[in-house]
Image (cartoon, rainbow, N blue to C red):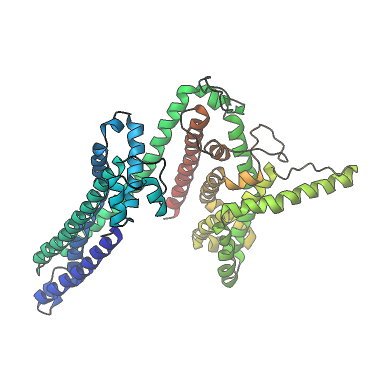
Amino acid sequence: MSTSLLLLLIIVIGFIAYFAGRARSLAQSGGKLSNLHSLPGYHGSYVAIWAMLPAALVLGTWLFAAPVYIDGSTRAALPDTVQSQGPAAVQLALGQVKSVAGGLLRLSGEELAALESGSANLRATLASKGVALAGEGDPYMVTVAKHFNAMTATNRWLMTVAVLLIAIAGGVYAIRNVATRFRARNQVERVILGSLIVASSIAILTTVGIVASMLSEAGRFFTMVSPFEFFFGTVWDPRFAAAGSGGASGQFGLIPLLAGTLYIAFVAMLFAVPIGLFAAIYMAEYASPRLRSTAKPLLEVLAGIPTIVYGFFALVTVGPFLRDISAQMNGLMTGNYQNFIQAQSVLTAGIVMGIMLIPFVSSLSDDIITQVPRALRDGSLGLGATRSETVKKVILPAALPGIVGALLLTASRAVGETMIVVLAAGVAARMQINPFEPMTTVTVKIVNQLTGDLEFTSPQTLVAFALGITLFVITLGLNIYALYIVRKYREQYE
């Protein structure tokens, strides 16, 4: 039985158990719900949990452990001549055996008998069934593949029986516990609390795992390249080393990439902050409810556009427009129609990224401005201040900590952007202050270093993890500081 069908059966058993538990609690209450400690729905949920949760846990454990056991048994069935060639040869043979095993399931009895007798070619027979096999195939593969198929079939049969029996046994056990004074609600809430803790733990452990993997690979990189050279180097030239050179050639200076990252993010913030902040002030203080209910969702649509679309917009529209307009301006002033703004430049990437960030600035700032207590507005207006004076002298100073936190969160979003920079700013890693020339960022070089069929054995590939952990620390610091400011602001008025 397939895993999806088995899961469906567990869910069906859970539904049956729910209604059975609910009906039993109603029967024992004698028609008066006040006799029950918990509502019938809690009793039904308790029985359903016992019917589904243990069975699902056993199924998950089985699906994880069974392939390991089957692979180990299949490796042991390989001939000694293969096992003596080392782990790589054993792993290759195991993969071929699995391919043969999948092909054997499509063969008729006569075709399988011909293979076992050696009168048919293994590769040609499997190819006729749409199974490609590297090499001609050795005779032992048929025997080992049959062993693999037999173990797989037995495993599925045992798994199906065990999981269904556990589901039924769990439901029966839970139904026997249903009684008028049974604390079913407490049991159900305890399971829900445990589920919430597990979900939170998964999120935390995922973050820890990501950081740990990046740190371990970055540590390998710093054993090959000096940390001082990486963090304070001003040249980025990670050319791949020639054979026999030890893979240590090239220069891995972070400063050009970090400068490009901060420069492009700064230009984007210069473009996004005024527009987004003024839009937030207008929608919060001046716009009518009807206009606000229409304009705010339309503005936030920008946040849902994929960044690759913004990149195409920069590459096809904004970049050529800035290039052509600069050529026209240069021609009017000097008579030389040569452009001074490159199509791929810091300005192009900053403008398009700023457009992407506008909804983040406006939405977060709008929410913060609307949280300023109404009493402050009324007090200012009551003292004779105009609406604009109230905004400038009362509302913005009161909302400033929250707005600063929102801007820091937006900046961390800008620092981590990749696709817009790839298409709009180029891949040139250099240090310069001219916004009309191309630069690149840390995220772009991470993509470049990990593109293609590479092995993580040289500094040219491991440097991506050092760049990643550096970017992680920067964005984490911005987020932590932003959250600190936002919480301080909230505590001020709660």
How far from the left and from the top, in percent, is residue 161? 17, 58
How far from the left and from the top, in percent, is residue 467? 51, 34
Q: Decide if residue 274 is in sight here.
A: no
Quadrant of residue 288 within the rendered picture? bottom right
Residue found at the very far top of the displayed protein: 245
Quadrant placement of the N terminus: bottom left
Q: Residue at x 39, y 43 (%)?
A: 207
Is 297 displayed left or right of 17 in the figure?
right
Q: Is residue 263 above or below residue 169?
A: above
Quadrant of residue 190 within the rendered picture? bottom left
How far from the left and from the top, in percent, is residue 323? 77, 47
Is 375 displayed left or right of 206 in the figure?
right
Q: Residue at x 91, y 43 (%)?
A: 335
Q: Residue at x 56, y 51 (%)?
A: 397
Residue found at the very far right of the displayed protein: 335
The foreground one among 132 and 384 is 132
Q: Is residue 370 above or below residue 448?
A: below
Q: Residue at x 43, y 35 (%)?
A: 214
The foreground one among 431 and 127 is 127
